[in-house]
Image (cartoon, rainbow, N blue to C red):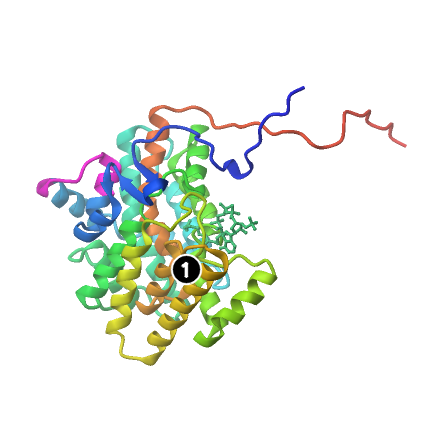
Amino acid sequence: TTVPEIRRGLAGVVADTTEISTVIRETNSLTYRGYPVQDLAASRSFEEVAHLLWHGDLPDPAQLREFRARERALRPLGRTTSELLARLPETCHPMDVLRTAVSLFGAEDPIEDDDGTAANRAKSLALLAKLPTVVAADQRRRRGLSPIPPDSDLGYAENFFQMCFGAVPEPEVVRCFEISLVLYAEHSFNASTFTARVVTSTLSDLYSAVTAAIGALKGPLHGGANEAVMHMLEEIGDPARAGEWLDGALAAKRKIMGFGHRVYRHGDSRVPMMQDALDRLVSRATDSEATRLATLHESLRRAVLTRKGIHPNLDYPAGLAYHLMGFDTPTFTPIFVMSRITGWTAHITEQLAHNALIRPLASYTGPGQRPVPTVP
Ligand code: CMC
């Protein structure tokens, strides 16, 4: 018998086609529907990019106006959802709150099972609009504060700051946040998107697929890395200790959070843009704490590159940037969800448009066939 080739972790396996985005590893570039992501991040709003991912093209002014109006109207949460989420224990991770919220949205939606494109587009937009409301209310709840309702006069990013802190920061900070949302929005067949496609391939509903995707994103090898980066920086503390800490961590075979990537080998295409946004946040900070963290961040980047030849991924600059914007560390990965919901739902629609059940094989290595012993 021939032994089938096994690609552990499906590394290098091409599982299907997609028209949504592509990672070009030779040039370390990423395009959404053909547009380089850094060009989108430099000149377009997150709402325009959401429209692009879902509909295949950037919106014209009239389409953008309509898109914005619909998104703004969908932001408030239903009473049942708010009440149930407020009763979750504060010890549970904000990603668990978000996962539960999406599950509740599904339970409350009378058309949950309609997987037609129009129904799924409506559900996707509702999720895009409501997730920030959940994330902001949850961060406030943990700080012992009551929720701030969404403000339909504000854009997606501004409204999120308003709901979190009761104030919108300077445009420069909002811009840096928006850049992170654009960069996080879509990344081909990553683990959480593939999870959403697996669930969708059984013809299950969109909420189930998104709930599962949130579970996949939570792990530190994937989206949970942006939170883990901050914990790591706090653990190291002193910039002068970065090299010594790294030696210890590598000797203990620890993975350095925010470094490495399955697809990119010579650097993540999204990093320069996010690093630039981070640098701008650091330069406008007035406290020495921001400078200390930035110095530590840079020393560790250099040490990892020198010792291991490994480059940072998007989570490395994004984690520290979210900290400097004032978000609590456990809120970082939920922010990733607020952005990636666009990519996930674009993939769910695409999967349904030419569905094939995703069901691979395994090479069995357990005991050979044997008789069941008679019951003594
Ligand atoms: N720290 C230490 N060593 C690393 C790291 C790292 N972050 N990343 C890769 N390596 C080593 C790895 O141990 C292996 O060494 P060896 O050949 O000696 O065993 C070598 O580099 C090749 O790595 P790999 O195991 O083939 O990489 P992979 O494709 O299986 O894993 C990864 C990719 C992202 C899971 C991994 O790089 C990692 O665990 N990184 C830390 C977590 C992280 O930052 N995740 C975010 C990923 S990107 C954005 C996102 O999804 O949010």
Q: Is residue 288 visible?
A: yes
Q: Is residue 54 left or right of residue 216?
A: left
Label count reads 1
Indicate yes or no whether the magenta region holds residue 60. Answer: yes
Give the vertical position of 174 relative to 286 (above or below).
above
Question: Which residue is drawn at the image coordinates 22% and 68% (left, top)?
Answer: 169
The x and y percentages for residue 19 are 30, 31
- Name the kind of residue labelled 1 in the image: Ala
Give the vertical position of 198 relative to 156 (above or below).
above
Q: Main secondary structure of the magenta part?
A: helix
Give the quadrant of residue 164: bottom left
The x and y percentages for residue 146 are 33, 67
| Mark 1, secondary structure of its residue | helix
Crowd rating for badge 1 (residues with CA inside 10 Å; few <14, some 14–19, many 20+)? some
Q: Which residues are magenta?
A: 50-62
Give the vertical position of 363 relative to 195 (above or below).
above
Question: Which residue is drawn at the image coordinates 19% and 36% (left, top)?
Answer: 57
Q: Is residue 355 left or right of residue 359?
A: left
Question: Which residue is drawn at the image coordinates 82% and 24% (left, top)?
Answer: 371
Q: Is residue 5 left or right of residue 236?
A: right
Q: Which residue is mark 1?
A: 86
Give the vertical position of 32 relative to 322 (above or below).
above
